[in-house]
C-alpha cells in the first residue's frame, strides 16, 4: 500500500515536470513562429521599398504602361466615338440637317430636283479616324505625361521624343496609337517605340455599310437597306424620309449599341410632281 502511494507520488511529480517542459516547449515554438513572421514581413517591406520590381513580381501586379494608358484614355475615346457617330463622323459639320437635336452631316447631297447626289465625303472611315484623333489628342498627351510621371515616381529616368497620335478603325476595334518613343532607365534600360490602346467597337462595319449606301444614293438615287441585314444580323438600319426630300440613315449595332447617322438628298421630285 505504501509502495503504491509512493509510486503514485513519484508518477505525479514526473507528470508535472513533463507537462512543464512541454508547456515551455510550446511557448518556445510560439516565440519562434512570431520571430519568423516578423522577419518575413520585414523582408517583404524591404522588397517593396528598395526593389519595386521584386515587389511587383511578388504581388503579380507588374506595372503595365499599356494598361495605364488604356485606363486613362478609354473613356474619352468612347465618348467621342459616340459623339461623332451621331453627326456623320464630323465634330463640326458644314452642310448638315438638324435631326433629333444633332447636326447630321450630308454625306451625299444635291440641291436640285431630278438629280442624283454628289458624294461629300468619299472616304468616310478615314475622315472619322482623323476627326476622332483630333478630339482625343489633347487627352492622349495628358495621359502620356501622366505615364512619364508615374515612372519617375517609381525611380525611373525617362527619355522620350516628341509625341503624336493616330487612330485606326479596324474590324472589332478602334485602335489609338501613341506614336511616341520612350526609354526608361533604372536597373536596366528599356525602350518603347510607342504604345497602342484597343477599344472594342463595331464601328468598322457601320462605316463600310454607310459607304456602300452612299454609293447607291449617288448612282441610283436610293438604296435597298434590307440587303445589308441579310449579311449583318447584328445590324439595324433606320431610314427616315423627310419633307424636304432628305433621307436620314441611322445604322446601329444591336449588340454594342453603337450607331452611325448620316443624311442624303438624292433624286428628289418637286412637290406635287405626278399629281394631276
Image (cartoon, rainbow, N blue to C red):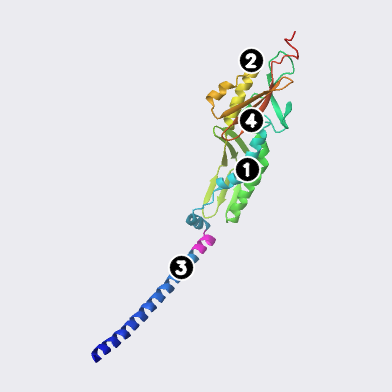
Residue at the spot 65% in from the left edge and 36% down from the top edge: 82
Q: Nearer the viewer, residue 16 or 264?
A: 16
Q: Residue 236 appears in which quarter of the rendering?
A: top right
Separation of marks 2 and 1 at Cα, in angstroms: 40 Å
Q: Nearer the viewer, mark 2 or mark 3?
A: 2
| Residue placed under numbered mark 2 in the picture | 220
Residue reaching furthest front? 1
Q: Are marks 1 and 3 in contact (CB under 8 Å)?
A: no
Q: Quadrant of the N terminus?
A: bottom left
Q: Residue 126 appears in which quarter of the rendering?
A: top right
Label 2 vs 1, first from the N-terminus: 1
Residue 216's place in the image compared with 78, above or below, is above
Q: Main secondary structure of the magenta part?
A: helix
Q: Which residues are magenta?
A: 44-51
Q: Are marks 2 and 3 in contact (CB under 8 Å)?
A: no
Label 4 vs 2, first from the N-terminus: 2
| Residue placed under numbered mark 3 in the picture | 37
Helix, strand or loop at mark 4? strand
* Position of residue 209 in the picture relative to residue 13 (left or right): right
Residue 276 is situated, as x and y percent measured from the top left of the image, at 75, 8
Label 2 vs 3, first from the N-terminus: 3
Separation of marks 3 and 4 at Cα, in angstroms: 60 Å
Amino acid at each position: 500500500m505504501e509502495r503504491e502511494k509512493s509510486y503514485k507520488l513519484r508518477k505525479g511529480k514526473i507528470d508535472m515536470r513533463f507537462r512543464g517542459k512541454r508547456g515551455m516547449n510550446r511557448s518556445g515554438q510560439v516565440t519562434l513562429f512570431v520571430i519568423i513572421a516578423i522577419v518575413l514581413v520585414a523582408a517583404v517591406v524591404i522588397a517593396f521599398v528598395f526593389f519595386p520590381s521584386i515587389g511587383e513580381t511578388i504581388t503579380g501586379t507588374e506595372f503595365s504602361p499599356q494598361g495605364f494608358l488604356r485606363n486613362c484614355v478609354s473613356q474619352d475615346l468612347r465618348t467621342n466615338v459616340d459623339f461623332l457617330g451621331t453627326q456623320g463622323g464630323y465634330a463640326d459639320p458644314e452642310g448638315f440637317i438638324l435631326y433629333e437635336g444633332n447636326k447630321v452631316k450630308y454625306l451625299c447631297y444635291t440641291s436640285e430636283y431630278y438629280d442624283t447626289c454628289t458624294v461629300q465625303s468619299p472616304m468616310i472611315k478615314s475622315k472619322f479616324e482623323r476627326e476622332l484623333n483630333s478630339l482625343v489628342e489633347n487627352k492622349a498627351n495628358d495621359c502620356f505625361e501622366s505615364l512619364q510621371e508615374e515612372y519617375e515616381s517609381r525611380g525611373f529616368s525617362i527619355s522620350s521624343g516628341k509625341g503624336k497620335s493616330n487612330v485606326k478603325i479596324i474590324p472589332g476595334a478602334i485602335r489609338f496609337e501613341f506614336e511616341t518613343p520612350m526609354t526608361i532607365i533604372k536597373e536596366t534600360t528599356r525602350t518603347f517605340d510607342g504604345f497602342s490602346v484597343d477599344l472594342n467597337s463595331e464601328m468598322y462595319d457601320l462605316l463600310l455599310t454607310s459607304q456602300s449606301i452612299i454609293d447607291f444614293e449617288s448612282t441610283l438615287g436610293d438604296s435597298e437597306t434590307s440587303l445589308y441585314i441579310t449579311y449583318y444580323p447584328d445590324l439595324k438600319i433606320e431610314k427616315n424620309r423627310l419633307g424636304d426630300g432628305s433621307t436620314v440613315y441611322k445604322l446601329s449595332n444591336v449588340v454594342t449599341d453603337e450607331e452611325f447617322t448620316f443624311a442624303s438628298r438624292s433624286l428628289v421630285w418637286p412637290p406635287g410632281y405626278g399629281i394631276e
